[in-house]
Image (cartoon, rainbow, N blue to C red):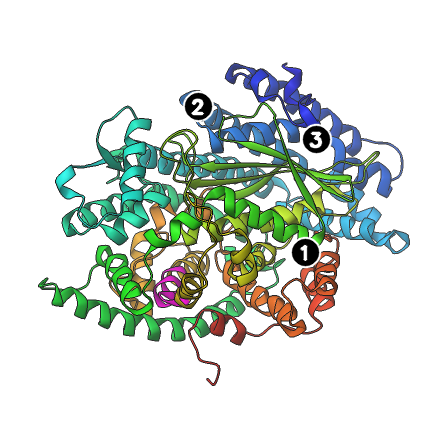
Amino acid sequence: MNPELTHWTGPLGLPRFDLIRDEDFPPAFDACLQLAGQAVEAIAANPAPPSFDNTVAALESAEEPLNRLCAIFYTLTGVDSNPAREDQQRQIAPRLAAHGSKVSMDPRLFDRVEAVMQDADDLAPEDRRLTELTLRGLRRAGAGLTGASRERMAEIRERLAVLSNDFAQNVLTDERDFTMAVSDDQLAGLPEWLIRAMRAAARERGLTGQIVTLNRSLIVPFLEYAADRGLREAAWRAWTARGSGQGAGGAATDNRQVAAEILSLRHERARLLGYEDFASYKLEPEMARTAANVEALLTEVWAAAKTRADADAARLAEMLHEDGVNGALEPWDWRFYAGRRRKAEHDLDEAEVKPYLTLEAMLGAVFDTAQRLFGIEMREFVAPLWSPDARAWEVTRNDQPLAVFVGDYFARPSKRSGAWCSSLQQQHKIGQGQRPIVTNVCNFTPPEAEGAPAYLSWDDAHTLFHEFGHALHHILSDVSWPSMSGTSVARDFVELPSQLFEHWLEQPQVLDRHARHAETGAPLPAGLRDRILAAGNADQGFATTEYLESALVDLAFHRGAPPADPMARQAEVLAGLGAPAAIPMRHATPHFAHVFSGDGYSSGYYSYMWSEVMDADAFEAFVEKGDAFDPQTARRLEEWILSKGDSRPADELWLQFRGRKPGVQALLKGRGLVTATD
């Protein structure tokens, strides 16, 4: 086995990605699965009476080599997939699921942890919490099942692992394989920066001219600026066809039946564990607790969002008809006319803004904000990573090392879409302790040429702040055990730090300090800054509606009996909502990776809004002090939110920070969906 896969020797403890080959992974998984099985068996078969140290604490370290191997492998499959890695994913997914089932459904482990829990009153608070979480995890995995039910649960988990992997790979294939050529006489309306990005995308694929790909940072501005309505429709249909069998991969990448089988198996899994449906099972440990509570929040916001969206749709339809186009406003029209409206009402054009929002400038804003709030320093260093695009920083405070941070910001055909934060290793205090190694991955449009600046949109800049908010949750983690550190918290709590950190992008003092013109170095003019901020809620009816459609469809999929035809159920839900025809779901079922590429956000896509209720209220804590960088409030934010992981229940941590429960009004006002007097 390549030792670099489990014993990392790169700078500051990073893996040496330059020493890792695809063919290293199969024998490494063989060895690490065997080691993990032996370590867990030793705990389960230990003849000594169960104790916290020999059972619960021992489980925290039992699978460390396998965890490190998985961290490297799944990082690479996300940022730099290839046929060999995709095949290895298909091979390893059921094996990892089988191992997980064997461990989490072992009745001997369950009995030992249960015995420790019976005497947990004498444990330190974090040790007691870890014991509670471990026991809950074993119960929810099916450790209490016997006979045929137990065997069926293991089968379900293995099959779900295969299906989730298939779903993700099908979407990636459609995204990777689609390109749409745009001729020189079809460039009307497109700003020069976008044309340059389209030409760079063509060169990257060995093509000439300019193309549109399904990279969000390319296709969204194309839909906003392209004057050719037919081209907008073609681009939009390709974007929304991912995973449907009508995408670039054809029938081979059709996820509709994959989604149906996933929903059926999830429901069966929940019923085996005694729950009414999968939503009841999934939401039990979350802050929301029940599907009824989720629905109450989403429907309260839906009413305000739809009112705003309907009014916006009427105005955009007028603009469409003024252009001499007959018929209804279509989904491929919305961004185009919304952009025109924003230009007219706020005198704001993204082409005017982008030169001030380079990646380097916004990274400076992100790092400076973190330094002013939490006292951390970022020092970039050279390390052998998976791509020349990826960069590494050491994170310190008071000259003491805190973490290592890796950022990979540009779109590549081999990278899955979207943006995410993950960790190569978690913070903990076992033995000598361990610093976190955190990654942020985005899909921004690369610079036109080597050495040229990379321009971000306002939405891209928000994404940059969002993902670093997640990173701070890892970086500032200060708990004893890896399984409760960093972002290992309730799903509807995990987005609080990320969405909260976005607020600082919109602070005039941050923009005034960091938004500098790429060519002249001139600061962002105050008038332009004010227009950017004034236009922040210009299209919130659209943004909120498309999000809520996806969240409500996700919830409906997992409540009650699973739909035999998910697409029909999707249509039924949207019709029941009276969803505007020109605003489709943000993530239609065949490419709803949050929900079907694993079950992390299944019955949980609502969590972005649940967390937004808190993040709007949390930033109010700074506003009330009259200082967005109030040091006392920042210390409390770190103490009770960012450093605690899952060492205490999320609602307790929130109350310690804020002193009261949050309300939805701050969210509605923040999105501009109600006025201050409503």
Amino acid bearing label 1 = Leu
- Circle number at residue 52: none
Distance between mark 2 and mark 1 Cα atoms:
44 Å
The residue wearing badge 1 is 373
Distance between mark 1 and mark 3 Cα atoms:
36 Å
Front label number (2 vs 1): 1
Element under disc 3: loop
| Circles 2 and 1 in contact, beta carbons < 8 Å | no
Question: 492 or 394: which is nearer to us?
Answer: 394
Image quadrant where one finds the N terminus = top right
Element under disc 1: helix
Amino acid bearing label 2 = Asp
The residue wearing badge 3 is 63
The residue wearing badge 2 is 87
Tell me which residue sits at (85%, 43%) in the image: 52
Tell me which residue sits at (31%, 43%) in the image: 193
Tell me which residue sits at (52%, 14%) in the image: 23
Which of disc 1 and disc 2 is earlier in sequence?
2
Residue range corresponding to the magenta coloring: 537-547
- Along the horizontal axis of the image, is 191 left or right of 161? left
Q: Residue 678: x percent and y percent? A: 46, 84
Question: 556 or 551: which is nearer to us?
Answer: 551
Q: Is residue 16 above or below residue 331?
A: above
- Along the horizontal axis of the image, is 612 left or right of 547? right
